[in-house]
Image (cartoon, helix red, strand yellow):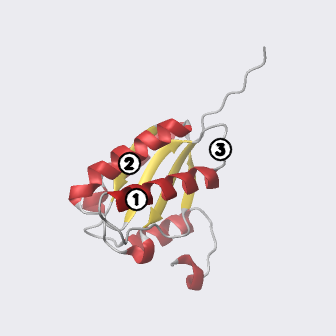
Amino acid sequence: MPQSFSKVYLHIIFSTKFRRPIVTSAFQSILHSYIVSLGANLGTFTEEIYANPDHIHWLCTLPRTLTIAELIQKVKISSSNKMAELGIKEFSWQKGYAAFSVSQSKVSVVKRYIQNQEEHHKKFSFQEEYLKFLGENGLEYDDKYVWD
């Protein structure tokens, strides 16, 4: 019987709406756990995750049965609803996102990068970080539309 195999790693980044620093330390671990569990239910495995106050980094595998857009949409909608249930009524994610493929040989590098977010953001803002990722990955963007 034929089988289909895939192991595609993604580094996904998206921010809160208007980059509001709304993910407090009180809700950070809840958000991490929720997204990891939701991702598992969708068929993805989380290698690393870190929710900053205004954005998230998620290193995970892409399920064979979902597109990147479908995965992110499901996670954003469900996690926004969860945060509202927890009492953060004004919580929402930005409309856009960035998703980058990660080779097997670079998974540990990206994991360390995500684990070091707190220190990293003492030196660089989310906007600087995001634009750097876009540039390093050869993605053109229009300043008028990259932020919502």
Identify residue for label 2. Answer: 49
Marks 2/1 in contact by CB < 8 Å: the verdict is yes
**How far from the left and from the top, in percent, is residue 105?**
51, 37
The residue nearer to you, when weighing 83 against 8, is 83
- Tell me how far mark 2 sits from mark 1, CA to CA: 7 Å
Q: Is residue 44 visible?
A: no
Instruction: Tell me the mark number nearer the camera, choosing from 3 and 2.
Output: 3
Q: CA distance from mark 3 to mark 1?
A: 20 Å
Q: Residue furthest right?
A: 1
Earlier in the chain: of badge 3 and badge 1, it is 1
At x 55%, y 35%, the residue is: 43
Please identify the quadrant where the N terminus is shown.
top right
Could you tell me how far apart the alpha carbons at marks 3 and 2 are, in whole angstroms?
Answer: 20 Å
Q: Which residue is mark 3?
A: 66
Question: Which class describes the residues within 10 Å of circle 2: few (<14), some (14-19), or many (20+)?
Answer: many
The amino acid type, in three-letter code, at marker 2 is Ile
Q: Which residue is mark 1?
A: 56
Q: Residue at x 51, y 78 (%)?
A: 147
Q: Position of residue 9 (x, y in %)?
A: 55, 42
Query: Nearer the N terminus, badge 2 or badge 1?
Result: 2
Residue density around tag 3, few if under 14, some if 14–19, many if 20 or more, within 10 Å = few
